[in-house]
Structures are given as C-alpha cells and as structure tokens.
Image: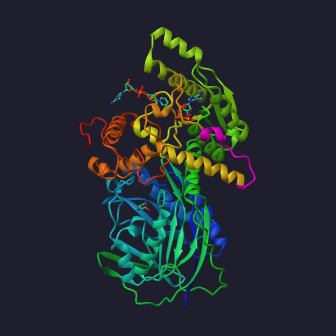
Amino acid sequence: MPQLRIALAQVNATVGDLAGNASLVVDWTRKAREGGAHLVVFPEMVLTGYPVEDLAIRTSFARASVEALEALAKSLDDAGLGEVAAVVGYLEHDSAGPRNAAAVLAGGQVVARQFKHHLPNYGVFDERRYFKPGSSLDVVRVNGVEVGFVICEDLWQDGGPITALGDAGVDLVVSPNASPYERKKDDQRLPLVARRAAEARAPLAYCNLVGGQDELVFDGDSLVVDADGRLIGRSPQFVEHLMLVDFDLPGGGDYRQGQVGEFDVRRVTVSEAGPSYEPLPAPRVFEALSDEAEMWHALVTGLRDYVHKNGFQSVVLGLSGGIDSAVVAALAVDALGADKVYGVSMPSSYSSEHSRSDASDMAVRTGLNFTTEPIGEMVSVYVEQLKLTGLAEENIQARCRGMLLMALSNQHGHLVLATGNKSELAVGYSTIYGDAVGGFAPIKDVLKTVVWDLARWRNAEAEKRGETPPIPENSISKPPSAELRPGQVDTDSLPDYQLLDDLLDDYVEGDRGYDDLLAAGFEPELVDRVLRMVDKAEYKRRQYPPGTKISNKAFGRDRRLPITNGWREG
Ligand SMILES: Nc1ncnc2c1ncn2[C@@H]1O[C@H](COP(=O)(O)OP(=O)(O)OC[C@H]2O[C@@H]([n+]3cccc(C(=O)O)c3)[C@H](O)[C@@H]2O)[C@@H](O)[C@H]1O
Ligand SMILES: Nc1ncnc2c1ncn2[C@@H]1O[C@H](COP(=O)(O)OP(=O)(O)OP(=O)(O)O)[C@@H](O)[C@H]1O
Ligand SMILES: NC(=O)CC[C@H](N)C(=O)O
C-alpha cells in the first residue's frame, strides 16, 4: 500500500504581502519537511492573502502574484524543500481573466495548477465579480498516491469537482480554504467535509486560513476525515497550526483522465512510492470552542490583526464606565497587552460619579493606561458660541470626546477604537462624528445582550484561571446610559434590549418582512418604530468604522441597502 504523510499548514497570511506570504510558505514547508511530510497544503490564495477584492482585477498585482509563485517554487528548492509537494493558492490571470488558483510546487517548478470552479457570490463573497471559473482538474501523483484538489466553495456546492474527482478515482482529496468565521459555522463544516469525502470515496483534508482581514476573521479549524467521513484530525481555532497525518491508501486504482463529467482531468507524476516509514500516532482532534469562547477569540483576533497588519502598536478609547467600552477595553487588553491600551475618562457636567470610578476600576483590574480629560470647558465654548440647545447640546459632548480621541491618535499614534454595538448601530443610537469616530469598531457586530453575555463569560474565565476578572461588576449590572443629559437612560429612547435584540435578529439577520414579524408575535407599534429607526440609520452605518464580523449577517458587505430609500416595510 502506498504511504503518504501530509501536512496541513493553517497559517495567517496578509492580503497583498506577496513577499511576507512567500516566506510564510517557506517557513511552514520547512516545518512540514521536518515532520516528514511529502505534501503540504496551505489555505486558499495563501500567496496573495484572502480576499484580495479589487486587487484581483489589477493586472500588475496578478502579474506580481504569478512571478511570486514561480520565485517561491525556486526558493523552496533552494532551501532544500523541493522534495515536498506544496499546494499553494495564488492569483492567476490568463486569457480568460483573473483566476482563483491553486498550484502544486515541487522540485523548483510549478508542476500542476487548478482554478476554482464554484465562485461564491453571496454574503461577504463577490467572486463572480472577480474570477473566471475553472473547468480542468490536475491530479498529482505523490509517493504513488493520486491526489485531487478542490478549492473552498467547490466543497460547498453539490456536483462539480468533487463528483469528477470521485469518478476519476483519486486516492485523496485536499482542499485549500478561506472560510470566514461566523457563529456556529464550524458546526456546518465537519458534516459537509464528511459528506464530500463519501461522495469522492476518498479521505479529505481541509485546510483553512487563520487570522483577521479587515472585517473578516478566519478561524482555522482545519479537518481531516477518512473515506467514510470519520473525523481523523482537527486543528485548534484562531491559531496557526501544523497538522501531520499519515495515510495508507490503496493506490493502483482505476484512474481516469481526459474528459470526466464536465472537467478535463490531467494527471501529473511528482513521485512514485517512496520507502516505507514508521507511522506517526493519529493527529489530535482539538475540541471546538464554546459559542462564547469562539466569539471572544474571533473578536480578539480580528482586533489584533487589524491593529498590527495596519502598522499600529497601540489603541485609545473613551472609558465611560459602561459595558460597551469596558468590553472593548478587555478585548483590546487580550489582543494587544494592557501596556498598549490607553483608556481616557472624559467627564462632562452630566457624567455620574460611577462613570469615573467604574472606568478607573477597569484600569486597575487590567493594568491599562488610564487618564482623565474633562471636557466641560470645551463643551461650553461650543454651547455658548453657537447657542446650542437640546440635542445639539447633548451631541456636542460626544463630538468633543471624538475630537479629543482623534487628537490623541494624531499625537501618539494610537488607533482609535469605536465602542458601538450592533443594537445601537441598527437603530442609529450613536452620535455621528461623536462616539462614532474611530479606525476600528471591535463590537459593531455584537448585539447588546451578547455584549453582556461576553462580559460575564470573560469574567468567569478569569475566575476559573484564578485571575482578576477584567470587567467591573457594576459596568455589567447598571442600566445603560449615554449620560448626555441628566438622568438619561437608553430605555428613554429604545425598547428593552432583550426585546430589541429579538426583533433585530429577525429583521436584520433574518431579513423578515413586516407581516412575518407580526406573525412572529411582535407588537405592530414596536415593529413600526424599530423598523423606522433601522431604515433611517443606514447613513450612519455607512460612515461607521469597520469591525469584526461574527454573525451570519453583519452590517456592511453582508447587508447592503440603499441609503436613499423610499421603501418602508408595513
Ligand atoms: N440621510 C442622511 N444622510 C446623511 N446625513 C444625515 C442623514 N440624515 C441625517 N443626517 C445628519 O445626521 C445628523 C443627525 O445625526 P446625529 O448628529 O448623530 O444625531 P441624532 O441621531 O439625532 O442623535 C444621536 C442619538 O444617539 C444617542 N447617543 C449619542 C451618543 C452616545 C450614545 C450611546 O449611548 O452610545 C447614544 C443620543 O442620545 C441621540 O438619541 C443630522 O443633523 C444630519 O446632519
Ligand atoms: N464620560 C465618558 N468618558 C469617556 N468616554 C466616554 C464617556 N461617555 C461616553 N464615552 C465614550 O462614548 C461611548 C458611547 O457611550 P455612552 O456612554 O454614551 O453609551 P454606551 O453605548 O452605553 O457605551 P458604554 O456602555 O461604554 O457607556 C462610550 O463607549 C465611550 O467610549
Ligand atoms: N472562500 C470561499 O470560497 C468561502 C465560501 C464558503 N462557503 C465558506 O464560507 O466556507
């Protein structure tokens, strides 16, 4: 029986950094080689990073990607790694147009290449805007084992490459992926991969990307299943990882090439059966994280990678003593370290005593840098000079704070974090150019009720580990308030958050219409009021900073609505 040892390199690539990603591939191929692997699989488009968006249609970038691929094949060989077949995703541009491609590099050459066939074009994906689909499959023979490839979405759609590879009689299917995290998505991947392995009648090795890219976070969670779909190995989530797996495969099957279904199948030999070797123990099956742990890790990873990949070292945010800024500060401390987080208390004449004491308690608990910058005098200058009253006077407080944070950013090079949550963004409950300023908004896709859940979860984790819980209990338990006028609480303007979030879940994430919402049991007055607020706030959301997606429908790319919009539900 031919033997094959493969490595799944779950790595964190950076979009556009061809040189950095190429050295990542060399480093991890070296690790794979040290582990005795014959074949190493990297995530989808690892050389360019994913998603490249409109870089895909820029021919200079495509040319650079192809040149980097060829140079990488040589670098691997020069580094003594040419005997390992490396599956490397990249951007190709041929006579048909841009391609989402995967190549096999071995012996200093590009020995095989294949283009993605099914191009996802829903949710956050726009691949039909960018790529032309492929219709040929390269099967490579490594150590006498016939290996076929499918790229990410090719697994998610019925038919297509998987069926053809099954009919072509491959021994193993490997799949480079860039599958972004969203809640509960890992529950879908394992059954999907298991089903596809059974269809291909071959084991399937699924390698996913890890790390943050703007609003997306990739969680890794790479998987290997046998031909019956049984789980053999699973990588941990949100960290780089190398999984090594040994296969004893039948080989010598009834291989077909040429036209198989709608695909042109080509066979390429890299190496015939090598000497036998001592098998490794079965790889680990890392347990999937709990729902809260997954969300927390996703938010930490998204924030950390946004900060670092954009050349920042530190962040600054307004600490009001409330739950939103407390959770954002705790995420930032976990992502960057307390010494890189700058919290500023900015009391105005309406700020309560607990807003200052809870903010400073947060700083003591976590060790973040804390200062107080009163804004009363700045506010007075505006109020008196412009004769501001009512809402204009209220909002000038949030705007002075926004301006102050941006000034600190300019002066010290910190990135400003906006602290708005998804419930507030939905209904427009924030001051544009006020508390909405910032470069990144870590919890913009987290509903308010989930913000509270995460705070409790994070504190409980700290207690389990014998550490000080980072979030003051008072920030969790007090009623939320913008403190822009005396005695103001959120429920003056908004329904109770549990009810609001239930409705938002149905309207925003579920895209349900008016009648459907009434049928679900919501009161007509509530539906009217909330839908009006949500629809009207589209302009604010468009100008809100980017932030990590964790739900199946985040504002932005997942949910695109016109700002100028005459349509009202109901
Ligand atoms: N379609 C459109 N396209 C572009 N711009 C548009 C627009 N419609 C209004 N605008 C502009 O937006 C302005 C109104 O927006 P804005 O100035 O934000 O003011 P607005 O939305 O009226 O008020 C802010 C609300 O957020 C609450 N708030 C503030 C701060 C923090 C928190 C919190 O707890 O997190 C809550 C505050 O209590 C108040 O209810 C208009 O004056 C106009 O300039
Ligand atoms: N007194 C303050 N000092 C510093 N920052 C403040 C202050 N008040 C508001 N902010 C900033 O503005 C954001 C909006 O806060 P606000 O208190 O108005 O409502 P919120 O959405 O309930 O937020 P939080 O739960 O953090 O209080 C805060 O998260 C914080 O970053
Ligand atoms: N890159 C892709 O093709 C991703 C699409 C796929 N449905 C996923 O989220 O896993």
Where residue 475 appears, as percent x and y from the top left, is 62, 38
- Residue 80 at least partly seen: no
Q: Quadrant of residue 404?
A: top right
- For the rendered model, the colour scheme is rainbow
Check the image and name the residue furthest to the right.
Answer: 466
Image label count: 0
Return the residue nearer the eye: 342 or 347. Answer: 347
> With respect to residue 42, does 127 lie above or below?
above
Q: Which residues are magenta?
A: 464-477
Q: Residue at x 39, y 79 (%)?
A: 165
Return the residue nearer the eye: 94 or 517. Answer: 517
**Quadrant in which ligand 1 is drawn:** top left
> With respect to residue 126, does 247 lie above or below?
below
Return the residue nearer the eye: 481 or 158. Answer: 481
Q: Residue at x 69, y 46 (%)?
A: 469
- Where is the N terminus found, in terms of image quarters? bottom right
Q: Quadrant of residue 336?
A: top right
- Where is the C terminus found, in terms of image quarters? top left
240 left or right of 428 in image? right
Where residue 373 appears, as percent x and y from the top left, is 64, 23
> With respect to residue 373, does 85 lie above or below?
below
- Residue 565 at least partly seen: yes
**339 within the magenta span:** no
Return the residue nearer the eye: 512 or 106. Answer: 512
> With respect to residue 69, does 383 lie above or below?
above
Where residue 425 appears, as percent x and y from the top left, is 44, 38
